[in-house]
């Protein structure tokens, strides 16, 4: 696994304005350091015909937390990010939406994205789908394993079976989001419980809405916001997994 020199911030979704300073403050502080002043934030949005509307909340929320210049980076669904479009930015935010679409748009140029992040270093913030695709092995959707439901169908991202694909390799943790709100923690448990041994898929990180997990280059991380993070580890027994809740304010 190749990890960027800069920090990684993963947000479980949610738009509670009161939580914004805690959730986005660490990322924007890192972006200001990378810029040596007021940072330009490239906000990658999957454009399904409403890209401008999906970017609009970022143009409002981020400057409300700290001085910055959000810049839209709209990638039409079915297309791939052009890494040259990151030129002039000091940080990358990957927004939320259809997680399989974001994986298809960004992961094919993962090497270039990681290189750009390291050459700064520049921070990354993944919001919902952007958090899910940050991992080595990204959970992009699905609500069943075989015939067994593991989360609500509405959380399946238009996929039936639990599906993982290669991710951006910014963290070793498999990530699922909206955990308390959408009931996706069991899907993460099933991913870890059934993952093949010896491939580095034995650890999961679930994140509630309005909650951020900020990761350091040395592998440590902290939790901030209004919800919890959920650490999931594969157990020693066959088919086992263990969960550890981490409230805001905790650092590992």
Image: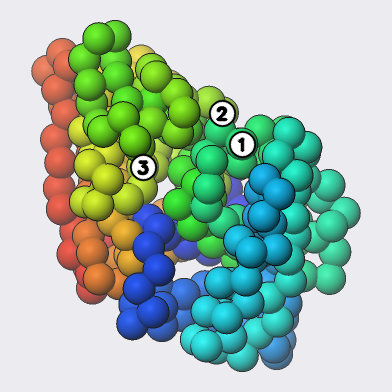
| Mark 1 vs mark 2: in front | 1
Rounded to the nearest angstrom, the CA distance separating label 1 from label 2 is 13 Å
Mark 2 = which residue?
166
Residue at 69% from the left image edge and 88% from the top image edge: 38
User: Where 204 falls versus 7 (above or below)?
Assistant: above
Which element type, helix, strand or loop, lies under badge 1? helix
* Disc assigned to residue 139: none
Q: Earlier in the sequence, mark 3 or mark 1?
A: 1
Contact, mark 3 vs mark 2 (Cβ under 8 Å): no
In the displayed structure image, the side of residue 122 where residue 233 appears, left or right: left
Mark 1 = which residue?
101
Which element type, helix, strand or loop, lies under badge 3? strand
The reply to whether residue 221 is visible in this rendering is: no
* Disc assigned to residue 176: 3
Which element type, helix, strand or loop, lies under badge 2? strand
Judging depth in this view, the residue of 60 and 137 nearest the camera is 60
Residue at 22% from the left image edge and 60% from the top image edge: 228
Q: Earlier in the sequence, mark 1 or mark 2?
A: 1
Q: Earlier in the sequence, mark 3 or mark 2?
A: 2
How many callouts does the rendering have? 3
The reply to whether residue 49 is visible in this rendering is: yes
């Amino acid at each position: 696994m190749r990890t960027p020199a800069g920090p990684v911030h993963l947000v479980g979704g949610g738009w509670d304005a009161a939580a914004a300073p805690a959730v986005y403050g660490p990322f924007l502080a890192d972006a200001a350091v990378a810029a040596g002043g007021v940072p330009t934030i490239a906000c990658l949005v999957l454009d399904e015909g409403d890209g401008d509307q999906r970017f609009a909340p970022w143009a409002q929320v981020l400057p409300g937390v700290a001085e910055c210049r959000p810049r839209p980076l709209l990638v039409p669904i079915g297309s791939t990010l052009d890494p040259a479009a990151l030129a002039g930015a000091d940080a990358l935010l990957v927004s939320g939406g259809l997680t399989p679409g974001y994986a298809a748009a960004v992961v094919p140029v993962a090497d270039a994205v990681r290189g750009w992040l390291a050459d700064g270093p520049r921070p990354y913030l993944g919001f919902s789908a952007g958090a899910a695709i940050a991992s080595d092995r990204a959970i992009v959707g699905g609500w069943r394993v075989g015939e067994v439901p593991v989360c609500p169908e509405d959380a399946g991202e238009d996929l039936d079976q639990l599906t993982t694909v290669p991710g951006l390799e910014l963290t070793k943790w498999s990530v699922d989001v909206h955990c308390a709100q959408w009931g996706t923690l069991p899907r993460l448990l099933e991913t870890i419980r059934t993952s093949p041994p010896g491939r580095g898929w034995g650890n999961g990180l679930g994140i509630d809405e309005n909650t951020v997990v900020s990761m350091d280059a040395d592998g440590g991380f902290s939790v901030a916001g209004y919800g919890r993070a959920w650490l999931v580890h594969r157990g020693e027994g066959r088919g086992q997994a263990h969960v550890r809740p981490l409230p805001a304010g905790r650092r590992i």
